[in-house]
Image (spheres, helix red, strand yellow):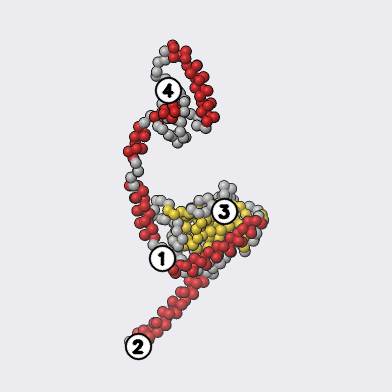
Amino acid sequence: MVRMNATRKTSPTIRCCIVSLCLSWCWQTGACCVDHAEVIDLSGKVQVLLEGTDEYADAREGMTLESGDKVRTSGAASAGLSFNEENTNLIRLGEKTDARISLAGDEKLELNDGEAFASVSDLGAGSSFEIRTPTAVAGSRGTDWVTTVTAEGTEVEAVDDEPYVRHYESSGQLANIETLIRPGEMTVVRLFERPKQFRRMIPERMQYWQSAKKDMRKRATQAFQSRSQRKPFDRNEFKRDLRQRRNQSTFNPLEDTGKAADDKLKPMGSREKTAAGEGFSATGRQEKGMEPLTSFEAGGRQQNASEEKSPAAKAETPKKAGKRKGDAGQVKDKGYGPF
């Protein structure tokens, strides 16, 4: 009984020690990192495909992305992502980029196409921050670098400090060797090949990314400050809204369907207007003093092959053809376009 009492008295202290040790271990190893990425900045058209859905939807600032979610950007668009609560481990996806959130240990992102600028400054001891591409894995333990997927392979540019790159062996396995890239230099990694010889970055690109880093950090700070004032992202609600919009667009009736159906049944020569403009209808041609078309196909102007021509008609054909050729030239001069 005495032993049990002693154990009960000391158990709160022991528990506190265990919690403190666990928190310390988490902080040092990075085990307390969040299990999602947050969209903190958007420019242009950016879409996401959440895991478990089959349709891309417009991204929103403040939404969280889990492992398996996909992000794509259109031309002249970009997306800023944060991978920790303090918004200090960041990735900016450039235009025409296709990526997938990974969150598998050190690997945070799969870059299938396009460009990703990573700026990482808050990692636990012994941990890394990596981006996987079809031909390599680029990462760091706290630096700024650019990863670009091209037709040639993977380009890795060191903006600050020394990121590393790992290539794939011919067996398909990822090499254990980490090739460090010095600041201001870059390399290219092709599939199943070691990194190419380093070369200097273009000075304009170095200046651009250094400026982009400042802008990205500024936006990350603003997003961190406004997070408490923003409604938390509800993933299930987002999916429900997506399904509702899809159902509404599926069952939304077409306007003026009767007129559209009647218009489809009319021969081409009887329509007053077409996509190419006025002048193709029989009425329109008569109003402009032009001879009506004898064929129902305005583009072909060919006689029906099944019709029998009389000798008189055959004799008149060259004359009519010549006259019609002149008409066509006049119509073209008037700006009605080719038939």
Query: Mark 1 sits on what residue?
Result: 231
- Mark 3 crowd level (few <14, some 14–19, many ≥20, 10 Å Cα): many
Does 254 sit left or right of 290 as displayed? left
Mark 1 and mark 4: Cα distance apart in space: 67 Å
Q: Residue shown at 48%/71% (left/top)? A: 26
Mark 1 Cα shell of 10 Å, populated few (<14), some (14-19), many (≥20): few
- Label 3 or label 1, whichever lies nearer to me, is 1
Residue denoted by label 4: 294
Q: Which residue is mark 2?
A: 2
Q: Earlier in the sequence, mark 3 or mark 1?
A: 3
Secondary element at image label 2: helix
The numbered mark, 1 or 4, whose residue comes first in the sequence reads 1
Residue count near mark 4 (Cα–Cα under 10 Å), binned few <14, some 14–19, many ≥20: few
- Which residue is at the front of the view, 5 or 107? 107
**Along the line of sight, which residue is nearer the eye, 276 or 214?**
276
Inspect this view and state whether residue 134 appears: no
Quarter of the image holding residue 297?
A: top left
Q: Residue at x 57, y 53 (%)?
A: 148
Q: Which residue is mark 3?
A: 148
Report the number of numbered marks.
4
Amino acid tagged 3: Thr
Label 4: state its secondary structure: loop
Q: Looking at numbered disc 2 in the image, what kind of residue is underneath it? A: Val
Label 2 and label 4: CA atoms lie apart by: 114 Å
Q: Which residue type carries mark 1? A: Lys
Q: 68 above or below 8?
A: above
